[in-house]
Amino acid sequence: MTAGGRRGRYHHGDLRTALIDTAIELIDERGVRGFSVAEASRRLGVAVSAPYAHFADREELLAAVAVHAYEVFVAELRPQLTRFRAPARRLAAIARAYVRFAGTHRPLFDVIFGAGIDKVRHPEVKDAERPVTDAVLDCVQALAGGDAASEELSGAVEAAAHGHALLLLDGDFGHGEQAVELAAERAARVTLALVGSRHLLGRPFEPVRRAEPATRGRPT
Amino acid sequence: MTAGGRRGRYHHGDLRTALIDTAIELIDERGVRGFSVAEASRRLGVAVSAPYAHFADREELLAAVAVHAYEVFVAELRPQLTRFRAPARRLAAIARAYVRFAGTHRPLFDVIFGAGIDKVRHPEVKDAERPVTDAVLDCVQALAGGDAASEELSGAVEAAAHGHALLLLDGDFGHGEQAVELAAERAARVTLALVGSRHLLGRPFEPVRRAEPATRGRPT
DNA sequence: ATCAGATTCTGAGCGGCGATCAGATAGGAG
DNA sequence: CTCCTATCTGATCGCCGCTCAGAATCTGAT
């Protein structure tokens, strides 16, 4: 393959990669829902049928964008994880990085959660997602042992991070860089609150009662 | 208006309502993304252009469905709110009802959050949403006073409820009625944990990291 | 009862999109 | 150089959102 991508030639050179990049551009301008394969082709100067040599359909192209999105996120997350040793802090760092990613790479975040990609038909996406879910699970298990309590905590943390990301993109924190930081910090604080909650890490409690469970896994 | 909606006649009778109902059916079968005005028309036996006498465009029809969805949710939420007096319990009840609604009225929930309706161009939706946000704000202000802490708590509660709803619809809690109840109960518990957290309701607690606007590397 | 005006619906049509297919073109292996 | 394979073109199909002129029907005022 002659890497290049020079336009005007019969063979584009690296149409696959160019399509992914252009897709991100278009999604940034008009949203996932407004993205069309035809327009991406036009922008690249190729026939509207050309993309189908590289992707089975529109969804497969979006899935490739989603995989790239996870790679970017993981690349940003990893250095943050090495900065903290305590599982609770690491969990908070994940939440913060997650919200930051949503705020600073909006089109990528949009593709991951707004494109309606069927992860069963596109296992690549699930694979790309794995490092993130693994990181969460690691921390949670260190904190909660490994049974129902850990499931509950990981669900709560995921929900908190994702929810704050949505609120941020909805404009609830304002706009601009400081909105992103505010939302990210809130998500981190909420995560720590969840980890520190005496309600979640004990066994299931029924009423709000202040029954402090005896067994509390609290390493570090 | 000759109420009726008998098919075969030139005038349908109540096409507007019929379109909303049929839209919900279709969305239930193929998802919001798969819904088309044309197919709804076909199913109702009218011309594909008929809907445009009642709705400016596809999005306006979906907005009407969203308004109906909020009405249903509010109708289910209200009796739950009267069952509890303590703000914390009410907040948990809201979260529980929210997740239950997502699980038992999936197409309606899909429309609200997956149809990409522009709430600025469709204020009816925001109006229909108001009773819910008001209920949350009521409880939160009773708990947190009214400043930053209350904003933080309400964001956390919304995030928790919405996040658990998404996890439920993603299959993370399994399937069927018991999955819905499990997810709803988890959301309620997490909400109580948030309310009970000494981290959230007090004044801001120690920053996780030293205030340092570090230069974060940006991978391609 | 009648009739003017406003609603609601039809039928035709436009442009855009996703997707398929046969065939042209280029790069690489032998 | 020659053949093979991957890549790209051009044409085409069906579906969709949406518009428009005009027909059918309903409404309310007289």
Image (tube, coloured by chain):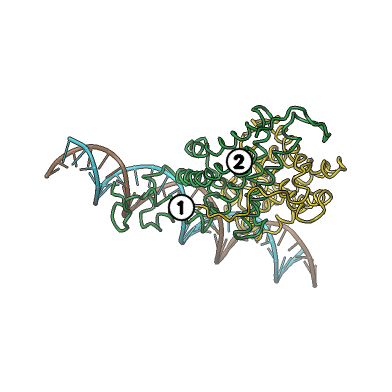
Chain colours: A green, B yellow, C cyan, D brown
Pinpoint residue B119: horizontal percent, then vertical percent.
66, 57
Q: Does B60 appear above or below B45?
A: below
The chain ID associated with circle 1 is A
Closer to the chain start, of discs 1 and 2, is: 1
| Cα separation between marks 1 and 2 | 33 Å
Name the mark nearer the viewer: 1 or 2. 2
Identify the image quadrant of the C terminus of chain A.
top right
Q: Considering the numbered disc 1 on the image, is that residue within a helix, a strand or a loop?
A: helix
Q: Is residue B181 left or right of residue A132?
A: right
Q: Is residue B50 left or right of residue A34?
A: right
Pinpoint residue B100: horizontal percent, then vertical percent.
72, 38
Q: Considering the numbered disc 2 on the image, is that residue within a helix, a strand or a loop?
A: helix
The chain ID associated with circle 2 is A
Residue at 67%, 58% (x, y): give it.
Answer: B122
Which label is found at residue A90?
2
Q: Nearer the viewer, residue B200 or C27?
A: B200
Q: Nearer the viewer, residue A92 or B210?
A: B210
Pinpoint residue D15: horizontal percent, then vertical percent.
50, 47
What's the residue type where badge 2 is placed?
Answer: Arg
Question: Pointer 1: what residue?
Answer: A23
The reply to the same-chain question for discs 1 and 2 is: yes
What's the residue type where badge 1 is placed?
Answer: Ala
Residue at 76%, 35% (x, y): give it.
Answer: A199
Q: Nearer the viewer, residue B85 or B144?
A: B144
Residue A60 visible: yes
Q: Is residue A36 left or right of residue A11?
A: right
Residue B76 visible: no
Q: Nearer the viewer, residue B119 or B86?
A: B86
Residue at 55%, 45% (x, y): give it.
Answer: A80
Q: Is residue B37 left or right of residue B123?
A: left
